Image (cartoon, rainbow, N blue to C red):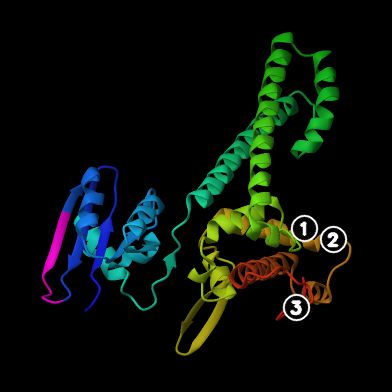
Amino acid sequence: MKSTIIGMDIAKNVFQLHTVDPETGEIYRIKLRRDEVLPFFVKRAPALVALEACGGAHEWGRQLCSLGHEVRLLAPKSVRPFVLRNKSDAADARAIWTAVQQPEAHFVAVKTEQQQTVLALHRMREQLMKFRIMQTNALRGILYEFGIVLPSGYPALAKAWADAIASAAQRLSAILIVSLQEQWARVQSLDKDIAVLERRLADSLRRTEQCKKLIKIPGVGLLTATAAVATIGDPATFSSGRQFAAWLGLVPRQTGTGGRVRQLGLSKRGDVYMRTLLMHGARAIIARSKHSPWIEELLKRRPYSVAVAALANKLARTIWAVLFHHTPFDPEHSSGPSI
């Protein structure tokens, strides 16, 4: 007997379901309120339930899995091509039902609560970092108008701040100096909040065996290790390290016609935050005084930015291999050049 497939479009209050009876071919379009969803699935035989990987999808995925259903999450970009004519909740549910049956469909692993918690800490830290950058840039811009040049980067700015504000206090109005000091106090408060989140991430790393394995990879630090484990979810979702790198947008786009295929720049698809961390890790490796022969040869043949992207791709593949095979990183055992 064929398994029933249910496409479910989730929202805050109204949920739309689309399914086809595998025996009779009869089409069912069902609209449910939020409090009716779980009772509906409790009464259903185990089925394959497909959802878009959007807000709340992982929580619904966990609850449906606990009821014995198989849950598959699809990226919204994989569903959009199957929305025909006008967009509606019913059309979205039908598109999800269609997309999950495609042979080349790629799925997102249902994340655990712990993984979502770690990602939430990363998002909060990223937001605080943006606030801090905005505040420090404002300070630099204001003082630059009065002929005082402050260095770029928060650590350098923190060292130069005391002398700069003391110099400014000798010739600028007291009301401006007080306002600048209040602004700097807000920056320091943000810095303390960021440090608290980083300590919580460090605690999560110490309690997670997967993160302990990743931290030993050159170019992978606290942020990259914790974010990678939480972002990937189940490594078996990806068939290879290359597929994981492609999911992060670290492989070139391709265009071709008439049998001729051209390689373009990076596709830059997927998780921007994770890709950024890997690019920073690759830059850190290249900035070291001693490089591996592979990196040296790469820098001779390609521009610096291309070498960084290639090394970030290699880092992504290495991370996937460590997580998928459940083995610690071994620099001597590698299918390609060592990092």
Q: Residue at x 77, y 70 (%)?
A: 339
Against 313, residue 185 (above or below) is: above
Residue 308: assigned label: none
- Where does residue 165 sit, x and y in percent of width and height? 80, 20
What is the secondary structure assignment of the residue under circle 3?
loop
- Where does residue 55 sit, x and y in percent of width and height? 39, 48
Mark with earlier residue (2, 3): 2
Any part of residue 49 in sight: yes
Q: Which residues are magenta?
A: 23-30
The residue at which mark 1 appears reads as 284
Residue kind at label 3, given as amino acid type: His
Cα distance between the residues tagged 1 and 3: 22 Å
Mark with earlier residue (1, 3): 1
Q: Depth check: 226 or 129 in front?
A: 226
Residue kind at label 1, given as amino acid type: Ala
What is the secondary structure assignment of the residue under circle 1?
helix
Against 258, residue 21 (above or below) is: above
Q: Total label count? A: 3
Per the image, is 91 magenta? no
Q: Depth check: 152 or 81 in front?
A: 81
The image quarter containing residue 122 is top right
The residue at which mark 2 appears reads as 288
The answer to the question of whether label 2 and label 1 lie on touching residues, with beta carbons closer than 8 A, is yes
Residue kind at label 2, given as amino acid type: Arg
The residue at which mark 3 appears reads as 333
Any part of residue 83 in sight: no
What is the secondary structure assignment of the residue under circle 2?
loop
